[in-house]
Image (cartoon, helix red, strand yellow):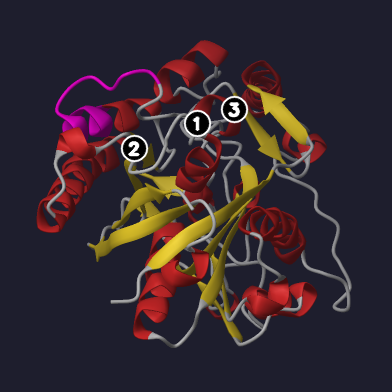
Amino acid sequence: MTRAAITGTGVFTPRESITNDELVAAFNAYADRRNAEGADPPVPHSSAEFITKASGIERRYVLDKSGVLDPDRMYPKLPERADDQPSLMAEMAVDAATAALSQAGVGASQIDAVICAASNHERAYPAIAIEIQQLMGTQGFAFDMNVACSSATFGIQAAADMIRAGSIRKALIVNPEICSAHLEWRDRDCHFIFGDVCTAVVLEREEDAAQKPRWTIDSTRCATQFSNNIRNNDGFLRRTRDAMEDRRDMQFVQEGRKVFKEVLPLVSNHIASHMADAGWQADDLDRVWLHQANKSMNDFIGRKVLGREPEPGEQPNILQDYANTSSAGSIIAFSKYQDGLGDGARGIICSFGAGYSVGSVLVERRAP
């Protein structure tokens, strides 16, 4: 059976970042203004200690820092672009994709399919993926995909399935996430969660990649289970409902305690059954690259998957620097934490989030 292999990854990181201290200063200034206006109930203050304890996040990268830190605004200010200019998401994707193609030693013209898999898309149509195809000069076809924070692993499975079926030979999956635009920066319970980034992954037929280092995809698995506990009600029907006002439910909304309680067993059981069906044991794993939503969640899942406390580096977290970057998080971890893994090393890439959704990819390192 034809198998797919990951031969290249790339990460676009915005130039600007916001520390917890900077974010808290802006939020507390906003809270003081709202409270002086008679907010009912009063807006509580945030603190860097609260953020770190709740999430493990210390800073986050954003496309626009000034708008987020303006107490009179509290969301990014991104200039509108003309229709004949590249979209922001496509621009980010080209940067990450160029790095991934370079690492893979693959020319853009060799790519048969582009999948833009992300939790939010800059517009409804034309597809961001088709714009990326045009900017990169790839062949074949392109389409957008949205499975919230699981979009990257779902995109990998879709591309791997097409390679297995023989309909394509090479694919590019990009995950441009402008999470700062859908985060409610005025809500103490979540104002620290997200950051902006873009990741890219190149997939090839394994036989075409035999002369290069690669991660052979042994197995993929995706699952979904409907839940309202992570939700964003914004959409193209908003105008028809006369709901154009500044409504809280039109941004990221999460029932954090319910998510923590329900997602942990869902993900842990998903990984366990996937590994069991593939004939993999916990002792086979050299690395676990998880979705980067919350350090406590990742540490719990790492312990459940490995059956013990993970050794340093076995289950890497990048939350402290990037925060939650939705679908891109597990790919950032995968891209940046492969050191010391030689031929035959095994790992799992897993992402999970709204839906609920969970996707896992079992990979094995192969030398040329």
* Percent of width and height locating residue 213: 51, 51
Q: Residue 176 in magenta?
A: no
Side of 342 where 332 appears, left or right: right
Would you name the residue on which mark 3 appears? 321
Q: Is residue 93 visible?
A: yes
Would you name the residue on which mark 1 appears? 339
- Which residue corresponds to the image point at 40% horizontal and 86% vertical from the top-left? 166
Q: Residue 310 in magenta?
A: yes
The quadrant holding residue 202 is bottom right
What amino acid is found at the position of numbered circle 1 in the picture? Asp
What amino acid is found at the position of numbered circle 2 in the picture? Val
* Percent of width and height locating residue 176: 62, 57
Which span is picked out in magenta? 300-312
Q: Earlier in the sequence, mark 3 or mark 2?
A: 2
Would you name the residue on which mark 2 appears? 288
The quadrant holding residue 113 is bottom right
* Percent of width and height locating residue 249: 48, 54
Q: Judge depth for marks 2 and 1 and give the one in front.
A: 1
